[in-house]
Amino acid sequence: MSKLLEVENLWVKFPTRNGVFDAVRGVSFSLGQERLGIVGESGSGKSMTGRAILRLIRPPGMVEADKLALEGEDLMGRSEKEMRKVRGQQISMIMQDPKFSLNPVMRVGKQIMEAYRLHYKVSKKEAKKKAMAMLEAVAIRDPERVYRMFPHEVSGGMGQRIMIAMMLIPDPKIMIADEPTSALDVSVQMQVLEIMDKLVKDRGMGLIFISHDLNLVSSFCDRVLIMYAGRVVETLPADKLHEAQHPYTRGLLNSLPRLDAPCERLEVLKRDPAWAIEESVSG
Amino acid sequence: MSGIEIEGLNVWFGEYEERVDAVKSANLSVPKGGSFGLVGESGSGKSTILRAIMGLAPTWSGKIDILGRAVEKPRSRDFYRAVQMVFQDPYASLHPRHSVDQVLSETLSLHGFSDIDKRISQLLDDVGLGPSFRFRYPHQLSGGQRQRVAIARALAPEPKILLLDEPTSALDVSVQAEILNLLTDLRAEHKLTYLMVSHDLAVVGHICQDIAVMQLGEIVETLSVEDMRAMKTTHHYTKHLLESSLQSAAG
């Protein structure tokens, strides 16, 4: 399996009044043509890892890494201008809430077209055709109508599908999905995931799926990294998630209420300060 | 005596051609001291039922009885002393420039309590926050701690009934477990009646004894938790919900 992305010893630091805060501490992993899940609680640094790969951490935040390479080519040394060519075209990112990531005063179709025309020199007519095809690919029934709509006129699930269409249209090699479904309903969630899964598989892309939902990740991904306090504490094949060894992962799994196993009280996660100091596991 | 008795409740928004029927002839009854769950996808009207009970939905018809008495319009202070609500998002439901102390003392003085100081310490203790949290502002608290403050505020007038609108959906799973345990303890301690809304069947199954499934503004099925666990459902939508949540739990 060829490696699409290699990350070695990634650190994200923010200077604060009380010294430097390390949001991500020495994370290493590699990504092939697979679906990699990153799970953890809020504040564990999972979103920061995703942003750091795209070099989207703004000063005063700092990103340091021994290696951050896309198909063997270094990303750390690139200028801002060169990074803009990577973002969207090679690595794209889907954010949590479509309400905040779509331009509210621009018709949906025009936004998708713009995403395509930014990276490919094609006529408007051709771009529109491509945008329509993309809307159809994300299972929007009436693309002609949706094309002319404004973001406030579409539902959350549809908005997220539009985002997926927009992110996939430049044909990137890697997609980073940061909690793509946590703003959506359970029933719509599965639908959006299925669409994303199918498109990623068909195009042979690599997917980094960031989520706090353990069950979702275990059913959807191939491999899972579990993050705690900026470190990767454990890495597992997704179908073996329920055989996790690390006490943190076990604690998270046990704290979920279960329909098939009722109990009086739920187990509460007891945090061990040692988890935060341990070495990061590479995955 | 029943805690909450609802018969033929309709809630709608807008008028004439813009009228949207959010809840259509809903019936449900929660015994005193019981706990009842409402599940369904967003837009199915489950939160609207809670809002109608609290008097936050302006247009409704039907019968709402609380502790054996019909609710008055507008709701009286006695009503709010008996019924309190915990909202979904603790980031939005607490005033950003009021400290925990202000939030709780305002509620207490509104309801005419005199020994406010003692009660605040007691309330913070009840929800598992120490006295050190008393003079903090919401931005100095984590999501779970904020939800504890919101629960403390709801408990301040010593209510008999708590309406819980997705109390844990904005929280991490580890914090969710803490809050669910807290809710279980508080119900046993204060003999509370719960009416809880959630989209998560596992959460509702943990807290509640009876469950109503809603779809498009209608209650399509009411069943006990034991029946739900045993998959004894008659309605296909309930079955669909159950299957999808069991599927994701099995991995």
Image: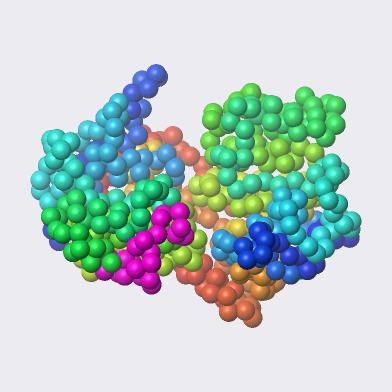
Tell me which residue sits at (62%, 33%) in the image.
Answer: B95
A246, above or below B97, in the image = below
Tell me which residue sits at (41%, 62%) in the image.
Answer: A158
Magenta stretch holds residue A60: no
Say left or right for B136 vs A30.
Answer: right
Q: Nearer the viewer, residue A251 or B86?
A: B86
Q: Is residue B145 visible?
A: yes
Question: Across the whole image, how many numbered discs are drawn on residues?
Answer: 0
Q: Nearer the viewer, residue A34 or A184?
A: A184
Tell me which residue sits at (36%, 27%) in the image.
Answer: A21
Say left or right for A161 vs B190.
Answer: left
Say left or right for A207 vs B20.
Answer: left
B194, above or below B27, in the image = above
Q: Is residue B37 visible?
A: no
Q: Residue furthest left?
A: A73
B96, above or below A179, in the image = above
The segment highlighted magenta reads A133-156
Q: Nearer the viewer, residue A205 or A258?
A: A205
Say left or right for B107 vs A90.
Answer: right
Rendering quarter of residue B228: bottom right
Viewport quadrant of the N terminus of chain A: bottom left
Residue A39 point in image, percent of width and height: 38, 50
Rendering quarter of residue A23: top left
Residue A122 point in image, percent of width and height: 14, 58
